[in-house]
Amino acid sequence: MSNRVVNVLAAASVAGLMFTLFGMSAGTAGAADPAEQVKDRQQTMKKLGGGMGAVAKFVKNEGATAEDAAKGAEAVLAVSKMDPKKIFPEGTAVGVADSAAKPELWKNWTEAQKYWSAVQPAAEKLDAAIKGGDRAQIAQALGATSKTCGSCHEDFRVKKN
Amino acid sequence: MRRVLTAAALLLPLAFAGGSARAAGEAPPNGAANDAVSRGAYLFNAAGCLGCHTDEKGGGQPLAGGRALATPFGIFYTPNITPDPVNGIGRWSDADFIRAVREGVRPDGAALFPAFPYASYTRMTDRDLLDLKAYLLSQPAASTANKPHDLTPPFSWRFLVPAWQWMYLTPGPVPDDPARPAAWNRGRYLVDALGHCAECHSPRTQLGGLDADRYLAGNPQGPDNDKVPGITSSKTKGKGIGGWSDGDLALFLEAGLTPDGDVAGGAMGEVVRNTTSKLTADDRAAIVAYLRTVPAKE
């Protein structure tokens, strides 16, 4: 019982800390220079990819534990809840630092936003599947989440060399 | 618990099934249906017809053509392959269809430009070609007129295409290699005939033929001038998939997810969406089995 309370408290404080950190970085993003914003985006995408990769490793049975997968899904879910305007501020298209975002992303912002908002429900299902523990369902949810990432990469990301 | 996990793993779409006895050029049963149209639907996905023959971005009807393919030789506009009798293939006979896809010759006798990957599709069996035709003819017709290509001479000179064909086209299916397992033969058929992977993943000569010495070794100047990575058995990043596990490859083909958690975009994202995600797990495993044996090119 007391263990549980400690855990909840710890989780709450970690969440609080992350919120503060995130809040701060979001607060400074407005004033940050575009190159910095591109770097921020790359960090965000890395976090997203790290989360996806962890779930994938679990699905492939390549050394990740269920706990790793759960953490991965949480990271994906957390990023999916971010405001796309903060991740993709205007003026950070290809040409700025090593940005890989096509200018079309801003020209078709409504579509891009639609793509982005499809990630969260998929990530929620992924999170739920991992909590459910059924590997086949996790694999399916992982594929579905990948698809939501892919639609945006297909239309709005320049080819990585 | 462990047993439950193992059982669940067997149900995974990623699970690898053992070898099967069917010949390479024979569509697997698609669910319960096993008529020409259903088999053709599977082949249609495996051959990736939809992507190039649909102007998705321009809001074109499926298979009505008009998609621009930017290549080093100019811009090709894909034709209408719906059953429309005037602008599509509605009036084509079985022989017309086989000749077009296998030999790159239109019903009126003119040569087709090799942007249409008939140098790969030529390996399709008669039965698969006719199943594919049955499927195409079951689709809604669109009267969209075909748009002329915008090519740079001499590549725009259609009368030169037969010379190209003489150099780069070896018509007809390739017999199965009896020394190899069925899965390998099936994988080769999926990679070389249906999937036409080499069309983007191999470099081209100055005349636009596939460079056979650099088979699947990557293409510095792929479609839309994108750099296309190699997919030989090389372990070097960007040159091959030798460093990927079977699970990595199966998951990539199924969901576009790379080992580092990235998701494919661009042309390969489209291939995953339209083709490899729609194959059976057996067929994806066959592709992997075959790619493992492609000699490394650095």
Image: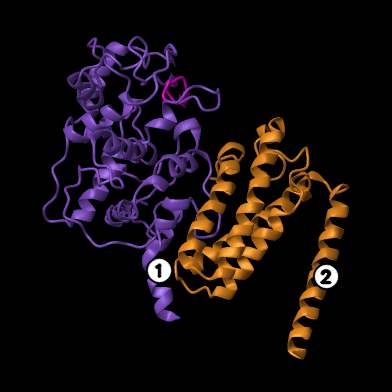
Q: Is residue A64 above or below residue B133?
A: below
Residue to which mark 2 is pinned: A17
What color does chain A have in the rendering?
orange
Q: Between residues B160 and B175, which one lies in front from this camera angle? A: B175
- Side of A155 where A44 appears, left or right: right
Tell me the quarter of the picture where residue B25 sits: top left
Going by the image, does A126 lie left or right of B90? right
Please report the residue visible at 33 percent of the width from the left and 31 percent of the height from the top: B205
Do marks 1 and 2 both belong to one polypeptide chain?
A: no
Tell us which disc is closer to us: 1 or 2.
1
Q: Is residue B68 magenta?
A: yes
Amino acid type shown at disc 1 = Ala
Give the label on residue A151, or none: none
- Looking at the image, the residue that sits furthest to the left is B178
Q: Position of residue A80 (x, y in %)?
A: 69, 54
**Visible residue check, residue B49:** yes
Q: Circle 1 is placed at which residue position?
A: B9
Q: Which residue is located at x 20 percent, y 46 percent?
A: B24
Q: Picture quarter containing residue B285?
A: bottom left
Q: CA distance from mark 1 to mark 2?
A: 38 Å
Q: In the image, residue B71 lies at what x, y percent? A: 44, 26
Residue B69 vertical position relative to residue B200 in the rendered view, above or below = above
